[in-house]
Amino acid sequence: MEKSSFENRSLEVKKETRVVKPKKKKQKIKPVKTGKTRNETVREKEEQEEEKEEAAPSTENTTIINILTKKINNYAIQNDLSTEYCFLVDMSLPSGRNRFFIYDLKKNTVISSGLVSHGSCNETYLARPRFSNKASSGCSSLGKYKVGEFYKGKYGKSFRLYGLDDCNSNAYKRAVVIHGYDCVPDKEIYPRVLCNSFGCVMVSYNFFDKVSRIIGQSGKPIVLWIYQ
């Protein structure tokens, strides 16, 4: 049988040539060793900024605070009281705003602030404060106080207050003290209003702890001034 021309033809196999691209070397990324994650660091900075904003009094109150702290410093020098810290309570502010200021007299700055209740004056509820120095009035009293000894009373951890002016001279007899209570939150609630006390300087439990640390750091009794 005659072989076909196809069978006689030698097959030429063409080899494919592949273009091999050089492999890119992967850059090794060295992990940055930090004690905190990025999210933790960002959150910490946000919390610090929030604390600064909460601590800072409004612009219109800054002048009043500067005047009062100078008077407190002079009074403290004359009466052997603390020239490191003082406490200011601005009753002209709404109760839902931070109006208890912890003031560093050395650095001339507010270092912390918190909510504080005013007295109900024995009414069901009092949105705006009224003031009285009378026994059993249930009202807050304006004026300067000396922060006294720590004790555990009806409302738990407390600091006694001694009135230094005629308008609050009965504070000790009335058992007007600084104490914490669970109806006072840690953050501002304005435009909502805060619960009332029976004339005591009533703050949140966490803010009470801050106040306690400042009192513990002070070598001498601290002046608290309630004003309007």
Image (spheres, helix red, strand yellow):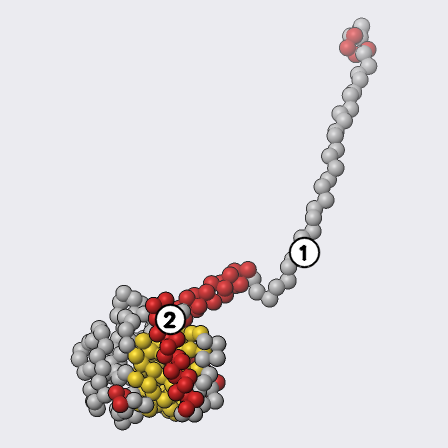
Ranked by sequence position, the earlier of labels 2 and 1 is 1
Front residue of this view, candidates 88 and 112: 88
User: Residue 101 placed where, x, y %?
Assistant: 38, 76
Instruction: Identify the disc placed on residue 14.
Output: none
Quadrant of residue 1 within the rendered picture: top right
* Residue 29 against residue 129 in the figure, above or below: above
Disc 1 residue crowd, few under 14, some 14–19, many 20+, Cα 10 Å? few
Residue 73 visible in the picture = yes
User: In terms of depth relative to the viewer, which is nearer, 12 or 47?
Assistant: 47
Would you say 87 lies left or right of 174 here? right
Q: Which mark is residue 62?
A: 2
Counting other residues with Cα less than 10 Å from the Cα at mark 2, is it few (<14), some (14-19), or many (20 or more)? some
- Tell me the amino acid under the disc marked 2: Thr
Give how far across and how far down residue 178 sits, in percent.
34, 84
User: Residue at the location (27% across, 94% down)?
Assistant: 173
Q: Position of residue 193 (x, y in %)?
A: 26, 70
| Quadrant the C terminus occupies | bottom left
Q: Which image quarter: residue 108? A: bottom left
- Horizontal side of 226 relative to 24 (left or right) equals left
Residue type at mark 1 is Lys
Q: Which mark is residue 30?
A: 1
**Residue plotted at (69% across, 48% down):** 27
Q: Can you tell which of label 2 and label 1 is closer to the viewer?
A: 2
Secondary structure at numbered mark 2:
helix
* Residue 56 % position (x, y): 40, 69
Front residue of 106/204: it is 106
Vertical arrangement, residue 159 with respect to residue 7, above or below: below
**From this viewpoint, which residue is outermost toward the bottom?**
173
Q: Residue at x 57, y 65 (%)?
A: 36
The residue depicted at 32 percent of the width and 90 percent of the height is 164
